[in-house]
Amino acid sequence: MKIAVAGTGYVGLVAGVCFAEVGHTVTCVDIDEKKVKIMESGVSPIYEEGLEELMQKNNATGRLHYTTDYQSAYKDADAIFIGVGTPEMPDGSANLSYIATVCRQIAESVEKDCLVVVKSTVPIGTNDKVEQFIQDFLTHDVKIEVASNPEFLAQGTAVRDTLHAARIIIGTESEEAEAKLMEIYEPFHLPIVSVKRRSAEMIKYACNDFLALKISYMNDIANLCELAGADIEDVAKGMSYDARIGAKFLNAGIGFGGSCFPKDTKALRFQAKQFGYELKTVDACVEVNTKQKTRLFEKAKKRMITFDGLKVAVLGLTFKAGTDDLREAPSSENIKLLLEQGAHIYAYDPAGVPRAKMQFPEDPIGKGEMHYVESPMEALDQAAVCFVFTEWEEIKAVSPADYKKQMRIPLVYDGRNLYALEDMKAAGVEYYSIGR
Ligand code: UDX
C-alpha cells in the first residue's frame, strides 16, 4: 500500500516508520527542509528509543522516504495519514489550523481515489469537517473518504506502543474505508476495534482523560494521606491487586505533564461546555493537577525564609523519564517560581537540557540564576535545597548518603517518591515527598 504521512512529530514519524517496517511504502511529509535532510540521513529529530534504528533500516530498504513536496507525496497515495499537532489554544480548545492546512494541500494534490486518515487528536466531529473541507477544495474528480484512527503511543515507548499496540481503533462511515484501514493494519496482527468516526474521536479523549483522572485521583488521595498519616505508596500497592483498578498509573507525584494529558483534559472540558454539558470530573482533574505541580515548592517556601541567592539543585527537567520533551513539565512551573524568588538553580537532566535552555537561558533573565550541569552530584554540590522532578535512572542512582555528603543543607523535596522514608532518615536527610 502506498502511504503518505503528513507531519513528522511523535505521531506522524513513528506511524510512518512503523508502516514502512511492516511492508508499506511510505513518504513522510514535513514543511521543514532541514528536518527532511536529517531524517534522510537516518537521524531522528525526536528522542525515541528504537526509532533511529528502524529509520535507518527502512531508509535502506527504499520503503521509507521524506519530502517537503507534499504534492508528489499525496497525488497517488492510497492513504494519507494526518499526524500534525493540535496544540492548545488559550481558551483550552484545540488549534486545528495545521490540520486545515494539510487538508487544503491534500484537496489540491490528490489525483486518484484516496483514504484520508486523521491520526491527530481532534475534537469530536472534526472528521466530518475534514471530509467536507477536502471535498470543498478538491481539484480533481476523485473520491475521498475520511477515517479516524487515534494514536495511543506514549513518549519514550512510541515504537513499542505502535508495533505492539493493545488495540487499533478505527472510525469509519463506509465499508470501503473500513476495509482499507483493516488492510493497512493487517500486517501488525493486532486487535482492531472498528466503530463510527465520532466514537473513535471520543475514545481517544476518553482514554487520555481517564488516565489523567486516575493520576489526579491518586494525587488527591496522596495529599489526604499526608494529613491522615497514611502512606500513598502502601495505599497504591493495596489498590493495585484489585484487577478492576489495575496496577498501572497509580503513581502519585508532582502532577502529570506532557503533550497530551494537560491538553486533552482541557480540550474535552471545552467541548463538553460547547455541547452545554459540565464535565465535573475532568474539571476536578485539571484543578487538582494545577495545584499538585507546585505543591512541593509551596511546602519548601514555608520552610525557608527566602530562596534569594540560595543554591537550589534541580534533578530532572522533562515531564517524565525517557523523553527530552518539556511540554507542561512540572519542572517549568517550579523553576519559574524559584527564579522569581532569586534562586540560583543548578539543573541536571540527561536529555532535557537543550530544550530547557530555550525556555530558561543561562544568561540572567531577572533576579535568579539558571545553570545547567553535567551530573546530579554537580547540581547537589553545596546546594541548600534539592527538588526532584523526574524519575530518570541517573537520578534514582543518587543515594541518600550522596545528598547528605554533597549538599550544604541536606534538604530534599522529591516529586517522584524515589526514596524510602527510612533510608533518607537513616542518612540524615530532611526529606519531603508526596503522600507520605
Ligand atoms: C500519554 C498516554 O499514555 C498515551 O497513551 C497518549 O497517546 C499520549 O499521552 P505520554 O504523555 O507520553 O502519553 O506519557 P505518560 O507515560 O502517559 O505520562 C503522562 C504524565 O503522567 C507524565 O507527566 C507522568 O509522569 C505522569 N504520570 C504517569 C504520573 O504522574 N503517574 C502515573 O502513575 C503515570
Image (spheres, rainbow, N blue to C red):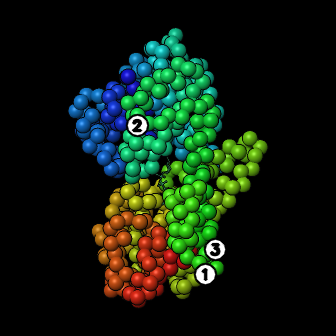
Residue contact between numbered discs 3 and 1, judged by CB atoms under 8 Å: no
What residue sits 50% from the left and 25% below the top? 116
Of the numbered discs 3 and 1, the one sitting upstream in the chain is: 3
- Residue 242 appears anywhere in the view: yes
For the residue labelled by badge 1, is the local secondary structure a helix, a strand or a loop? Answer: loop
Closest to the observer, 371 or 130: 130
Type of amino acid at the residue the image marks with label 3: Leu
Q: Tell me the CA gap for discs 1 and 2.
A: 46 Å
Rendering coords of residue 107 (x, y %)? 51, 21
For the residue labelled by badge 2, is the local secondary structure a helix, a strand or a loop? Answer: helix
Type of amino acid at the residue the image marks with label 1: Gly
Rendering coords of residue 253 (x, y %)? 52, 67
For the residue labelled by badge 3, is the local secondary structure a helix, a strand or a loop? Answer: helix
Residue marked by disc 1 = 229
Horizontally, residue 282 falls left or right of residue 376, namely: right
Residue contact between numbered discs 1 and 2, judged by CB atoms under 8 Å: no
Quadrant position of the C terminus in the picture: bottom right
Rendering coords of residue 9 (x, y %)? 42, 42
Closest to the observer, 219 or 26: 219
Q: Tell me the CA gap for discs 3 and 1.
A: 8 Å
What residue sits 44% from the left and 60% below the top? 320
Residue marked by disc 2 = 15
Closest to the observer, 72 or 166: 166
> Which label lies toward us, 3 or 2?
3
Rendering coords of residue 76 (x, y %)? 40, 17
Q: Tell me the CA gap for discs 3 and 2.
A: 41 Å
> Which label lies toward us, 1 or 2?
1
Of the numbered discs 3 and 2, the one sitting upstream in the chain is: 2
Of the numbered discs 1 and 2, the one sitting upstream in the chain is: 2
Residue marked by disc 3 = 224
Tell me if residue 128 comes above or below residue 191 in the rendering.
Answer: above
